[in-house]
Amino acid sequence: MLAAMRIHFLGATRTTTGSMYLLELNGRRLLLECGLFQGRRGESVERNRTFPFDPRQIDAVVLSHAHIDHCGNLPNLCRQGFEGNICCTFATRDLASIMLQDSAEIQRDDAAFVSKQRAKRGLPPVEPLYSAADAEKAVRQFVGVNYDRPFPVTDGVTVTFRDAGHILGAAQVVLDIRENGRQFRYLFSGDIGRGGDDILRDPQPVEGAEYLQVESTYGAREHAPKIDASAEVCRWVLETLDKHGKVIIPSFSVGRTQQIVYTLHQLTLAGQLPKVPIFVDSPLSVNATEVYRLHPECFNETIYKFLREKENPFGMENLTYIREAAHSRKLNDLKDPAIIISASGMAEAGRIRHHLANHIGNASNMILFIGYCAEHTLGAQILAGQKTVNIFGEPYQVRARIASIDSFSGHADRNELRRYVQGLTSDLKKIFVIHGEESQALGFGETLRSLRPKSEVLVPEYQQTVEI
């Protein structure tokens, strides 16, 4: 009997973190993604430090995009002996280089904090998962390839990247496989965007796929109508300015920050908003926006034309980008109305916590969330309506108005994912549903069974192995 291709589902199975999938075929080992697993501390440390395979025996890695839950454990993989190529788009390479450096700093600070707590109990210190030098080493193994350019990655496997429309450089991974005299096409969706994005192109259709591995982050949920987002931003900002207050926007550095800046720019140009001072206060956000400016090949036609014929879509005279901590601290002394955008989007780390501490107690101000906040995060507590929240271990009264807009999400919802799968005109033999909390993955699995009754639909569990 001929050997079959094996897929080992080693992360983001019935959860959304730690994306990692090992393909074995033709005597070779190809890794799709190598993301950080984020969960309870003990489990996270163990999962991230210990790979369920020998990194030295991996022939190549293919990366769909630069979010940390997809690329964040690559420095550890390389430190443990992986020496092959890490293949991705050029924009993903550039974004991942700044994301991994930032992640290394977080690993260092986290290890220092835990070590300090352990020292009080007479326990030895812990080491960071990886260092900035490990991150730099990993980035040197990145190989950039443009969209729509087929390239061989290992024996019998040719990869083509198709735009996924999720964040800058995000790709669907098309694997054309030759094994034991047969040929077939395996499609890994990566994370799929919603389409109609202000900045990015729509997800590209892929023809001829026989097997599909698809994300399900919002597989059983629907977003608010997208068309309302700009109008809502305008309304909330104007109401706050009328109260002579400030708008504080917790925002993820990659994707969401650029989107809200572009929205505010367009509203200002249209005369719907006054030229109120806007500050983007996050070194990672500033660096990410610079990467965005370097990759107009990822832009949709509208923003590309705006860039070519008018001006930088991420810059205007009333917008200031802040890297230095000293400049950030000066924002505390601002008396006049302003908009402050700062990371992180869930308010769990970064400078946003300082801005919340300084502004959450003033009823004239608004805290405007433009992204998802996971359970138990500071952002989720504020959104839940708690009257008092702890910031830096101190209680703060929540008097500022709180608002949330979820239509800026970079993930396709149930209907958009359904439309994506409908757009695959080929007959799919098997569909694997991954990268969604269990309720979302199982829910989308049921949707797919109705949509594709001839396809076998599986929702893999952690470390499950499937043969093709």
Image (cartoon, helix red, strand yellow):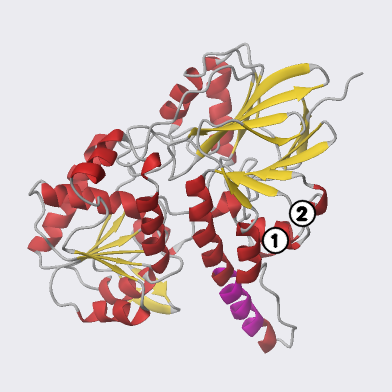
- For the question of whether residue 131 can be seen, the reply is no
Residue 245 location in percent, x, y? 15, 67
Residue 59 in sight in this render? yes
Q: Residue at x 65, y 41 (%)?
A: 13
Does 107 lie within the magenta span? yes
* Mark carried by residue 51: 2
User: Going from the N terminus, do you reach mark 1 or mark 2 first?
Assistant: 2
Please give left or right for residue 402 compared with residue 175 in the image.
left
Q: Position of residue 387 (x, y in %)?
A: 32, 67
The dot on residue 76 is: 1
Which of the pair 98/369 is nearer the observer?
Answer: 98
Distance from the alpha carbon under mark 1 to that under mark 2 = 9 Å
**What residue do we see at 30% from left, 47% from top?**
405
Q: Which residues are magenta?
A: 106-117
Q: Along the line of sight, which residue is nearer the eye, 234 or 162?
A: 162
Q: Residues within 10 Å of mark 2 (few under 14, many from 20)?
A: some
Q: Callout 1: few (<14), some (14-19), or many (20+) C-alpha neighbours within 10 Å?
A: many
Q: Residue at x 49, y 60 (%)?
A: 376
- Of residue 242 and residue 209, the one placed in the foreground of this image is 209
Which mark's residue is nearer the viewer, 1 or 2?
1
Q: Is residue 67 magenta?
A: no
Q: Main secondary structure of the magenta part?
A: helix
The foreground one among 210 and 42 is 210
Tag 1: amino acid: Asn
Indicate the quadrant containing the C terminus: top left, top right, bottom left or bottom right. top right
What secondary structure is found at the residue carrying circle 1? Answer: helix
